[in-house]
Image (cartoon, grey):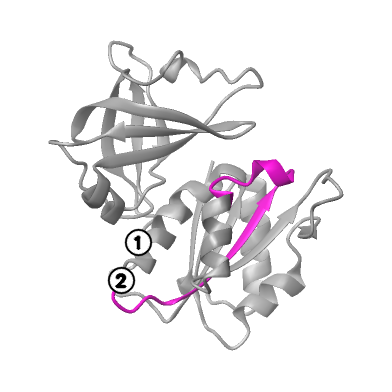
Amino acid sequence: MTTHQFTVREVVRETPRAVVLRLDTAGSRVVFSAGQAAMVGLAGHGGRKPYSIASAPEEQQRSGVLEFLVEVGPDGQSRPNLEGVGAGSRVIVQGPAGGFVLPRRLPRNLLFIAGGTGIAPLRSMIASALARRSPPSITLVYSARTPDEFAFDAELRRLSRQGRIRLVRTVTRTAHERWRGRRGRVQQAWVSACVRGRDPVCFVCGPESFVTKMMELLRAAGIPARNIRREQY
């Protein structure tokens, strides 16, 4: 795998349990496909962990920025491989790697199903698909524990309001009274409604138990195995 060293442009708190790590790639860009991952760690430290790239290749070409969605602890502290990371830190990126990517020739309909921080590679894919000259029809089903744990929420809701994607959000734990979205785990009826008459190619990413359940729901909705891609953590 190719190894790069980049400077951190900024670290932005995205949810109570995740930050967005924005790296300045000017002068040495990473060549990758939407959905791929890379090994990431602080320069000068041996530890590196795999993270899906959350930004699209087209965004890197336009802004010179590479983004990762990184889980943090309750105190906001990153894992040892990125402990103390902040603006100006030097970060090693090895990659890209992985075959969880958009097909070169996009189908007419895409269905994405994300659980928690599993939104990262799907956000990259969605942005890349929308950058095409003739974007496909896109549906995103996104499950999080609470309303404040939807990463990239403002961006996704804006795309939904603009009619560029169809967005279905649900929370699985306590939600405040202002929450107007769905509640509970993703249901068979929701998945069936998303795929009915569309024959989409489906991408699922999230915790292992979530991905296993979503695979069952997709198969029950009549989606053939060749149309389903999965990534779990």
Residue at horizontal 74 percent and vertical 70 percent from the top: 188
Residue at horizontal 54 percent and vertical 61 percent from the top: 158
Q: In which quarter of the image is residue 33?
A: bottom left
Residue nearest the observer in this picture, 48 or 126 = 126
The amino acid marked with disc number 1 is Ser
Range of the magenta residues? 132-153
Q: Quadrant of the N terminus?
A: top left
Q: Up-down: is 5 above or below 56?
A: above
* Element at label 2: loop
Say few, some or many: other residues with alpha carbon within 10 Å of mark 2 (under 14 / 14 to 19 / 20 or more). few
Q: Quadrant of the C terminus?
A: top right
Say whether residue 39 is magenta: no
Q: Position of residue 123 (x, y in %)?
A: 46, 54
| Residue 206, label in figure | none
The amino acid marked with disc number 2 is Arg
**Residue farthest toward the right in the current orientation of the protein:** 177
Say few, some or many: other residues with alpha carbon within 10 Å of mark 1 (under 14 / 14 to 19 / 20 or more). many
Say whether residue 133 is magenta: yes
Q: How many marks?
A: 2
Asked if residue 30 lies left or right of residue 47, the reply is left
* Element at label 1: helix
Residue nearest the observer in this picture, 212 or 127 = 127
Judging by the rendered image, the residue that carries numbered circle 2 is 132
Q: Position of residue 97 (x, y in %)?
A: 30, 44
Judging by the rendered image, the residue that carries numbered circle 1 is 128
Residue nearest the observer in this picture, 176 or 188 = 176
Asked if residue 199 lies left or right of residue 102, the reply is right
Asked if residue 194 lies left or right of residue 180, the reply is left
Do callouts 1 and 2 mark residues in contact (Cβ within 8 Å)?
yes
Task: Using the numbered discs, state the Cα–Cα distance from disc 1 to disc 2 in whole angstroms.
Answer: 7 Å
